[in-house]
Image (cartoon, grey):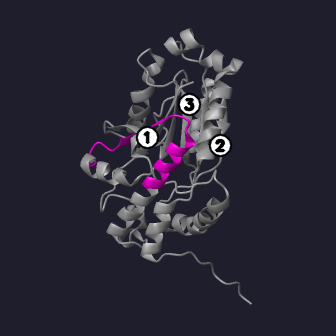
Amino acid sequence: MKNIIIVFTKVPKVGDTKTRLTEKRGGILEPEEAMHLYEGLLLDVINASVAANCGEVKICYNQSGDREYLEKLLSGVTHRDKIKDIYPDQGGSFDECMQYATDYVLKNGSKERLADSVIVVGGDLPSLQPGILQDVMKKIERLAATDRGHAVALDCDAKREENIGAALVEGACQEGGFSIIGYTCTTPFTFAGVFYNMTGVTTLDMTVNKAAEKKIPMAACEMTPDIDIPIDLASMIPVLRVLELAAIDDETIIAPVNTIRILNELGLESSSTPPQR
């Protein structure tokens, strides 16, 4: 099964990137610092996605983003030649943008599809590891081969000609969200109402609801936190130190060197409140 990893991201921009980490929004960073931090996060996510070696890597960025700036930033990834395509979303709501990002690849399972499945990751997951993405790919392939997967698969070229079944794999992040999602081109799933709905349902719950309604076989992968608010960053810093040290003796682990470098430049470290005696 041919797979593509889509890194779904904004182009870093001062005043538009990770604003909830800035002092103006109750955070601790200046707008320029928040932008540079996101640059490091994005580079590390791309490096992990490439190292996973379980599909071509494409980048889908916000339509209003500066493509030239993004190209310049990508000169800092470990293997720029492994990024096979960079394309803008088509604007609209977040649901619509992510739908376009995946439709661009899957094309409803037609002969013109670029891959049989996608794995979508956000650009702010500094603890993302190749092994997590490899696990997602294995679970997609396993579920797509099940009777349940075949039973609910969309009637399209991919099903008729290659018998690719439906499958959905998801990795949670904090506060009822998800940071990773993967599915096949025959999976009867859309992002409509996932991120923006009027009922207050979390994105993770909405995805589960959709899968349950359509009887889509679903699996979970390791939770991979993103960084949106100061507590996310404070909680992540010790994790990054673990990964940095563990990578010395474990070749399966990639240290998020870009994020760590920027945190060091900013002089940030985490701390806890000493217990009261």
Residue drawn at the location 27% of the way across and 46% of the way down: 67
Residue drawn at the location 64% of the way across and 53% of the way down: 251
Q: Nearer the viewer, mark 1 or mark 3?
A: 1
Residue drawn at the location 52% of the way across and 66% of the way down: 233
Q: SS of the residue at dot 3?
A: strand
Indicate the amino acid at tag 3.
Tyr
Q: CA distance from mark 2 to mark 1?
A: 24 Å
**Horizontal and vertical percent position of residue 245:** 63, 66
Q: CA distance from mark 1 to mark 3?
A: 22 Å
Magenta stretch: give its range: 42-66
Q: CA distance from mark 3 to mark 2?
A: 13 Å
Q: Earlier in the sequence, mark 3 or mark 2?
A: 3
Label 1 crowd bin: few (<14), some (14–19), many (20+), radius 10 Å = some
| Residue 131 in the image: above or below residue 152 | below
Q: Which residue is mark 1?
A: 82
Indicate yes or no whether the magenta region holds residue 64: yes
- Please tell me which residue lies in front, 45 or 83: 83
Number of marks present in the image shown: 3
Q: Earlier in the sequence, mark 2 or mark 1?
A: 1
Quarter holding the N terminus is: top right
- Please tell me which residue lies in front, 153 or 241: 241
Can you name the residue that lies furthest to the right here? 277
Indicate the amino acid at tag 2.
Cys
Q: Which residue is mark 3?
A: 183
| Residue 199 in the image: above or below residue 159 | below
**Horizontal and vertical percent position of residue 16:** 32, 58
Quarter holding the C terminus is: bottom right
Label 3 crowd bin: few (<14), some (14–19), many (20+), radius 10 Å = many
Q: SS of the residue at dot 1?
A: helix
Label 2 crowd bin: few (<14), some (14–19), many (20+), radius 10 Å = some
